[in-house]
Amino acid sequence: MVFLARALRRDQVEGHAFAIPSSSDHALQVEVLNGSGRTGLARLGARHLRRQGMDVVLFGNAVGERVDSTRVILRRGARDAAERVRGALGVGRIEVATDTLRRVDVTVLLGPDFQPDLAQRP
């Protein structure tokens, strides 16, 4: 019985009424935000991650936030999800910032260090 309870466990956030589903319950969901100011970088980053098998559910500009280097932010699930995204990008510093309002596993804030392969650009 204890084994079943552990198998059904989801990540709990203190003070939050509902459990956060872990990334093992569904495909890894990623949002890609452009924090560099370079036009079109989020679209290129999203395309790059999709080619690597990621489910990019949102991309756009990081409103009011500029970063000097790419940040891969774990929102829910295990750290290996963020490591998988960082590996696909080839750059990034992993941070953990649980956020129950964002329905993604990982948020990517692209910085100027992300250099997409422009040969794959349509």
Image: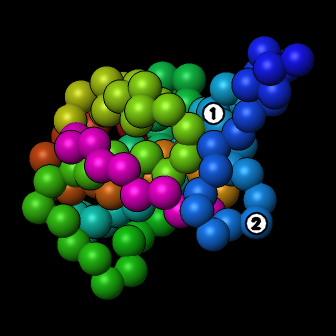
- What's the amino acid at mark 1? Ser
Give the residue pinned by disc 2: 17
Query: Residue 84, position in %: x, y?
Result: 41, 25
Hey, which quadrant is residue 101 in on the image? bottom right
User: Is residue 97 at all visible to an observer of this figure?
Assistant: yes
In magenta segment, residue 94: yes
Query: Residue 105, position in %: x, y?
Result: 56, 45
Asked whether 62 or 16 is in front, the reply is: 16
Query: Residue 92, position in %: x, y?
Result: 22, 41
In magenta segment, residue 68: no
User: Is residue 44 at all visible to an observer of this figure?
Assistant: no
Q: Residue at x 63, y 33 (%)?
A: 23
Give the residue pinned by disc 1: 23
Dominant secondary structure of the magenta stretch? loop
Q: Is residue 89 above or below residue 100?
A: above
Q: Which residues are magenta?
A: 92-101
**Residue 98 located left or right of residue 44:** right
Q: Residue at x 67, y 26 (%)?
A: 24
First-in-chain label (2 vs 1): 2
10 Å crowding of disc 1: few (<14), some (14-19), many (20+): many
**Residue 85 located left or right of residue 18:** left
> Mark 2: which secondary structure?
loop
10 Å crowding of disc 2: few (<14), some (14-19), many (20+): few
Query: Residue 54, position in %: x, y?
Result: 55, 31
